[in-house]
Amino acid sequence: MATIVARGVRFAYGADAGRVVALDGLDLEVRDREFVALIGPSGCGKSTFLYIVGGFLAPTDGAVLVDGRPVTGAGPERGIIFQHYALFPWRTVRGNVLYGLEERGLPKAERLERAQFYIDLVKLTGFEDAYPSRLSGGMRQRVALARTLALDPDVLLMDEPFGALDAQTRRIMQEELLEIWTRARKTVLFVTHDVREAVDLADRVMVMTAAPGRVRATLDARAAGAAGRETLAQEIWAHVREEVERANELLRYRAAARA
């Protein structure tokens, strides 16, 4: 089991007059082995919530539970993949994938076998001895994915992992992620700004409000099927557009109040 449950999550940056509330009253549930995409206006707290689930931030109020246990810090059952790769430039592809396995103290033969399995899984066979500087952006993100998968986490937390890629590479990576997810069946929480990406990848899409963030709507992408994806994408975009307009109106009101 690898469920994620958030109840009344609130998070605020800063203190006193400079305090900014990023999340306020966020409730959601991600089921075991489900792929859920979070989408919403910039600054709505999507990444903040992801880091709370990862254990890198503690909520100001409320709670997040993974498999019924409160998140109190980072843990091996949760693997996170960032937009900007976070690879060790002095390590090869194999060396990067091996890093976490070395930290866990696995026997050398087991480390090498597992690393090779995931290098093959992300289609980097033949690039084991290449350094990150010699790889394309898409290949670097594959290394990051292989490194995380090699640790066999129950939950994958993905923070706009394909946001820095060109359109063609992004599409290829989306297809390969779905293929890998179908085989590995991890619970996935995927942050994106791209409506089409959310619809194409996720079982369910959760649309967040403008800050302070909470869930505005949850839509079933799998039930829509291939024929209904365009309609669903338009529905999601309508939600997002309303939240963007609301955020802009609030900014105009605050600017007028200061004038």
Image: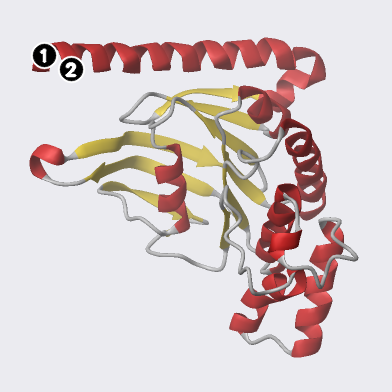
Left or right of 152? Residue 26 is left
Extreme residue in the right direction: 126
Residue 170: image x %, image y %?
73, 37
Tell me the quarter of the picture where residue 78 sits: bottom right
Q: Quadrant of the C terminus?
A: top left
Proximity of marks 1 and 2: CB atoms separated by less than 8 Å? yes
Amino acid identity at mark 1: Ala
Which residue corresponds to mark 2?
254
Whether residue 32 appears in this view of the structure is no
SS at mark 2 in the image: helix
CA gap, disc 1 and disc 2: 5 Å
Nearest the viewer among 118 and 217 is 118
Front position in the image: 17 or 36: 17
Q: Where's residue 258, x and y in %?
A: 10, 17
- Identify the residue under disc 1: 257
Q: Compared to 6, does 114 lie above or below?
A: below
Q: Quadrant of residue 100?
A: bottom right
Residue at x 31%, y 50% (from the top left corner): 59
